[in-house]
Image: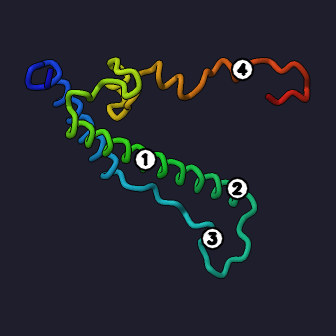
Amino acid sequence: MSTSDDPQQAENVKRWKAQLVALREQIIADGDIAIEPARRDAAQIAGDDDEAPLLEMSQVIASKRNRDRTTTLGLVLKALRRLEESPDEFGACKECGDPIGKRLERFPYVELCVECQAEIDGDPDSRKRPRRHLRDYR
């Protein structure tokens, strides 16, 4: 059944496309977060000892946010391509084929349902197992 045969799927495709385009435009309009240089004065050899860690932390935070935004933009562009190429399959998990569901409403660029994503990410409870001995780091 194609989107032309299913009015609900056609409506979903329009909504998802609008969400993805709006998200793409927002990311592009916001631009990158400026990263302050480590030294403001070229002649300055050492700055304020208290200011250096704060400045470094700000640089790390800004850099991570820029990387995350770039990653999200890439996912959005990939989702828009998938939506254009195969609108009938958009909204279905690429692993199991089940509907992605509400997760797609929050993150319109995801490709996996919650169960398949959890399988890929691993069981979070397995990381919380108590150690048998102090030197057991597994």
Residue at the extreme left of the image, as rendered: 4
Residue 107 drawn at (x, y percent): 36, 30
Structural crowding at the residue carrying mark 3, measured as other residues with C-alpha within 10 Å and reported as few (<14), some (14–19) or many (≥20): few
Tell me the SS state at disc 2.
helix
Q: CA distance from mark 2 to mark 1?
A: 24 Å
Structural crowding at the residue carrying mark 4, measured as other residues with C-alpha within 10 Å and reported as few (<14), some (14–19) or many (≥20): few
Q: Earlier in the sequence, mark 4 or mark 1?
A: 1
Label 4 vs label 2, nearer the camera:
4
- Residue with the mark numbered 3: 39
Residues at circles 3 and 4 in contact by the CB criterion of under 8 Å: no
Q: CA distance from mark 3 to mark 2?
A: 12 Å
Q: Earlier in the sequence, mark 4 or mark 2?
A: 2
Task: Say what amino acid the circle numbered 3 marks.
Answer: Arg
Q: Earlier in the sequence, mark 1 or mark 3?
A: 3
Tell me the residue at 9%/20% (across/down): 5
- Residue with the mark numbered 1: 69
Instruction: Say which mark, if any, is on residue 128.
Output: 4
